[in-house]
Image (tube, rainbow, N blue to C red):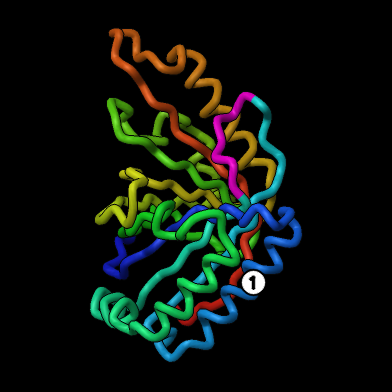
Amino acid sequence: MTASESPKLIYVAMRHPRYSHETFIKRWREHAALGMRQPRWRNVARYLHCDRIDGLSASVPTIDCDGIAVVVYRSETARQAHIADESARRTMKQDELDTFAQPVANMAVLLIEHVERPAPLDGFRLFVFWPTGPTDHSLARYGNLLQRADVGWTRNEATERMGAWDCPRVDELSSATIEPLCALAARVADALDVAQRGNDGNGIEREEPRLVLTRTVVLHDVT
């Protein structure tokens, strides 16, 4: 396992009502291009757009969204410098109003990543968003699927809540093909059924993880 000291921001992208999913993806790329033109972009090491795609069965609990963005900063000092650029922040906030259904910070979480098994950045990516509560926040129970050499696995532990969204952990599973990710998602759904979703067997309310299946587009990578 490799732990990173570089802060990592993940946000869930939800389109403005004026856009279809297809037109939003184009508009999202324009928003990204605007951000990458700002002088403060020197503080960013990696930027991914992970476009939501279909492929999960109806039994899998998901987030209704259009994609997931991943931003990795060069360091905590670089992240603070990024935030301190008020001119760029005002520009990007204004553009957010035309792009997203709500401010990005409302569905964002700051994390530190732990790479259990490295994999190429492109391809397909399955995100598992874990809620607060009595869940053990572990994918280990899903066994052999996590041991496949062709499936990358990164655990992301939250360090700071950006808005109202409380998400203590996000797992990323990546693969060159979609099949192993769909199989893992089905295993998660089966395990939730066994646990009788919403109740852990002791009368304690249990929140379920939410999954998003995506195709990754690498927009910036200097790592």
Residue 82 in percent (x, y) is at: 34, 80
Q: Considering the numbered disc 1 on the image, is that residue within a helix, a strand or a loop? A: helix
Q: Quadrant of the C terminus?
A: bottom left
Task: Out of 190 and 99, give the one closest to the viewer.
Answer: 99
Q: Is residue 81 magenta?
A: no
Indicate the quadrant containing the N terminus: top left, top right, bottom left or bottom right.
bottom left
Q: Is residue 73 above or below residue 51?
A: below
- Residue 19 vertical position relative to residue 186 in the rendered view, above or below: below
What residue sits 33% from the left and 43% below the top? 166
Q: Which residue is mark 1?
A: 29
Residue farthest top in this picture: 202
Question: Left or right of 81: which side holds 45?
Answer: right
Residue 97 vertical placement versus 212 (above, below): below
Q: Is residue 57 visible?
A: yes
For the magenta stretch, what is the residue range? 59-65
Q: Residue drawn at (55%, 27%), measured in percent from left and top?
A: 187
Q: Is residue 60 magenta?
A: yes
What main secondary structure does the magenta stretch of the protein show? loop
Task: Kindly indicate the quadrant of the structure image that contains residue 67.
Answer: bottom right
Q: Amino acid at mark 1?
A: Arg
Residue 72's x, y, as percent?
40, 70
